[in-house]
Image (cartoon, rainbow, N blue to C red):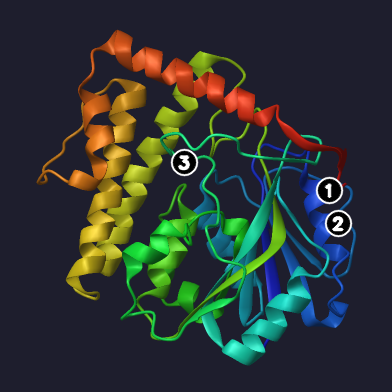
């Protein structure tokens, strides 16, 4: 349906925040007949009793398969994603639909507010070696429309972190449908997958400075490290980076022969970064058959350190992460 929005919400083994995510969509200022909600989860939730919510039970852990199933059951021309622990600002969908009508993007990314477990806005006070978890959306205070996505400087776009935080991404339906065979294979880095998928189609990329998403960081978060204790922190990142390596092999396969040399070079660089991060956090050797990349010098050096020095680095990262999560901008919360 033209300019109809489907919001796909995914959840796995985590019920705590899903009600907040659902309410943030149900309370949108956009007319209710202009969007639908599709929820894919592996548990029952009594709160889902609304007519415009499509409830899908799925025991698959990986994101790509969940989103593929949600896409299959949806009817929107515009697909917006939302993680179960994130939320939308109440006017997000109204703004998104108006921008899609004016700028006709195939890929849209808005800015976001970082919140803690209780909904308090928190400020990132250190810019240490990004893993990430805390990539900011580095966009000036104006909307940036990129009219020819296949000729733009992709490396500059990545510096803006346009491929981070799937809850801030909306795309035209065909971007996902055209690459569905690869979408189903993605385990973790769905945001990067969607961004690179959009580069296979000609169209506009739209970057919106409005902070329309609330991106939550919390103790059990898989994408930014489980901070319950340092061992779980290491294990959660090791598992994440292993999945990311596998995902970038899928992205490489998807892009093979279909994009320019610069894009292929950047994707290979991202693959190598995740390989090095996996080696740093797991201590396991991994095949790295590629030429030296100066952009990754810090990762190379860390991966070559003795185990006890790498563990000191990881402990420092762990402590910094916990410090960031405890720093509030204000005492009031947005919930």
| Picture disc at residue 23 | 2
Image location of residue 308, percent across then percent down = 31, 8
Q: State how far apart marks 3 and 2 are (Cα).
A: 28 Å
* SS under mark 2: helix
Q: Quadrant of residue 224?
A: top right
Q: Which residue is mark 3?
A: 132
| Picture disc at residue 19 | 1
* SS under mark 3: loop
Q: Relative to 30, does residue 50 appear above or below in the rendering?
A: above
Image quarter in which the N terminus is found: bottom right
* SS under mark 1: helix
Q: Nearer the viewer, residue 143 or 310?
A: 143
Q: State how far apart marks 1 and 3 are (Cα).
A: 27 Å
Visible residue check, residue 41? yes
Check if mark 2's residue and mark 1's residue have beta carbons within 8 Å.
yes
Residue drawn at (54%, 24%), measured in percent from left and top? 320
Q: Quadrant of residue 262?
A: bottom left
């Amino acid at each position: 349906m033209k300019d109809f929005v489907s919001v796909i919400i995914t959840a796995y083994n985590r019920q705590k925040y899903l009600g907040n995510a659902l309410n943030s969509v149900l309370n949108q200022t956009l007319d209710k007949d202009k969007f639908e909600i599709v929820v894919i989860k592996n548990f029952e939730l009594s709160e889902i009793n609304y007519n415009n919510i499509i409830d899908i039970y799925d025991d698959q852990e990986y994101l790509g398969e969940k989103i593929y199933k949600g896409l299959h059951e949806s009817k929107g021309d515009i697909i917006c994603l939302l993680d179960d622990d994130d939320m939308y600002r109440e006017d997000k969908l109204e703004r998104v639909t108006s921008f899609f009508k004016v700028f006709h993007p195939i890929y849209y990314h808005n800015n976001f507010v970082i919140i803690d477990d209780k909904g308090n806005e928190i400020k990132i006070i250190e810019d240490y070696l990004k893993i990430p978890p805390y990539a900011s959306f580095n966009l000036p205070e104006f909307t940036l429309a990129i009219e020819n996505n296949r000729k733009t400087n992709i490396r500059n776009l990545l510096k803006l972190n346009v491929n981070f935080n799937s809850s801030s991404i909306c795309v035209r339906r065909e971007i996902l449908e055209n690459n569905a065979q690869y979408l189903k294979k993605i385990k973790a880095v769905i945001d990067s997958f969607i961004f690179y998928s959009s580069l296979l189609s000609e169209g506009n990329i739209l970057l919106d400075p409005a902070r329309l998403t609330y991106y939550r960081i919390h103790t059990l978060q898989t994408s930014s490290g489980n901070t319950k204790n340092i061992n779980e922190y290491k294990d959660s990142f090791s598992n994440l980076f292993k999945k990311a390596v596998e995902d970038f092999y899928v992205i490489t396969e998807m892009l093979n022969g279909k994009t320019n040399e610069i894009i292929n070079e950047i994707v290979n660089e991202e693959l190598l970064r995740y390989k090095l991060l996996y080696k740093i956090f797991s201590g396991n050797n991994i095949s790295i058959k590629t030429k030296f990349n100066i952009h990754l010098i810090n990762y190379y050096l860390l991966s070559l350190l003795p185990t006890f020095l790498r563990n000191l680095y990881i402990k420092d990262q762990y402590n910094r992460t916990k410090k960031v999560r405890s720093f509030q901008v204000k005492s009031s919360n947005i919930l």
